[in-house]
Image: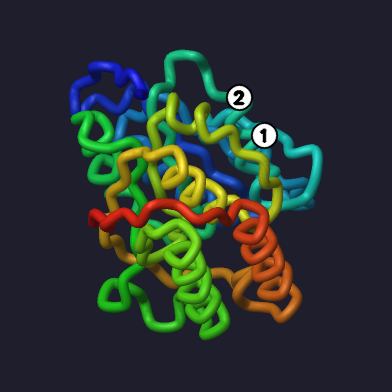
Amino acid sequence: MIAPTQPTEHDLTRVAVVIPALNEGVNLRKLLPSLVDLNLGHVIVGDNNSTDDTAAVAREHGATVAHAGAPGYGAACFAAMEKMPADADTVVFVNADLTDDVSLIPALTGPIRRNECDLVIGVRVPPLRDAGAMSLPQRFGDRLATRLIHASCGYEFYDLGPFRAIRRSALDLIDMKDRAFGWTVEMQMRAVQLDLRIQQLPVPYLKSPTPSRIGGTIRGVTRAAHGILSTWYRLREPTKPRSSRR
């Protein structure tokens, strides 16, 4: 059983925001200032070997920079996690490309800080998605992955949404291994296998002002699909079905 801390619901000073980024200097100039009013404890940019000014922009806006030693979404997240200070008790993962509505960070962290759950997934429901925000291959892959998870773990997820919050002690218990595109699948499957408390929260998904490096190219979609499916295959195991909680 995870021993929760006793923070107040609206105090975000012990929340660490992790932002994996690859050549996102332009978008970080808009994203990072939008986080200031939330009074977050820590903002950490996982720089995935960017060749632009991503790291400089992050430091300019007061964020901590963690350099990933290898390419991959998971590698950038993991590098940022290693920079989290000991007093951070809740972790929020946010896209760097302005697709997430960061004003909803308190809504994502609230159930955790009220000790109602350990993991909150932001579900990119169609009515709240901008037109063109997710490509057809992305939507198909997301639906396939959630069905595979349901078949192997007995839990019905509605999305692999990257905008999510998790209790620090739960994240430590999961012990993330993936360093590529299976990061979200691993976290969700391991959460079910460890019987963590999960909630799913409908959130908007905004169209990025810059082209997607994953959904916008055949190479990106192929790499993401391989990472997701290989991670599911590695972690699959029959478990007692659980009813989903949203």
Q: Could you say where residue 106 lies in the image, as x and y percent from the top left?
A: 25, 40
Judge left or right: residue 159 versus residue 224.
Answer: left
User: Which numbered tag is attached to residue 15?
Assistant: none
| Residue 2 position by quadrant | top left
165 to 152, vertically: above or below? above
Q: Could you say where residue 164 lies in the image, as x and y percent from the top left?
A: 40, 48
Residue type marked 1: Ala
- Decide which of 154, 140 is in the foreground and name it: 154
Quadrant location of the C terminus in the rendered image: bottom left
User: Which numbered tag is attached to residue 83?
Assistant: 2
Q: Residue at x 69, y 78 (%)?
A: 217
Report how far apart the C-alphas of labels 2 and 1 lie in the structure: 7 Å
Kindly identify which residue carries mark 1.
79
Mark 2 falls on what kind of element?
A: loop
Q: Are marks 2 and 1 in contact (CB under 8 Å)?
A: yes
Residue type marked 2: Lys
- Decide which of 48, 150 is in the foreground and name it: 150
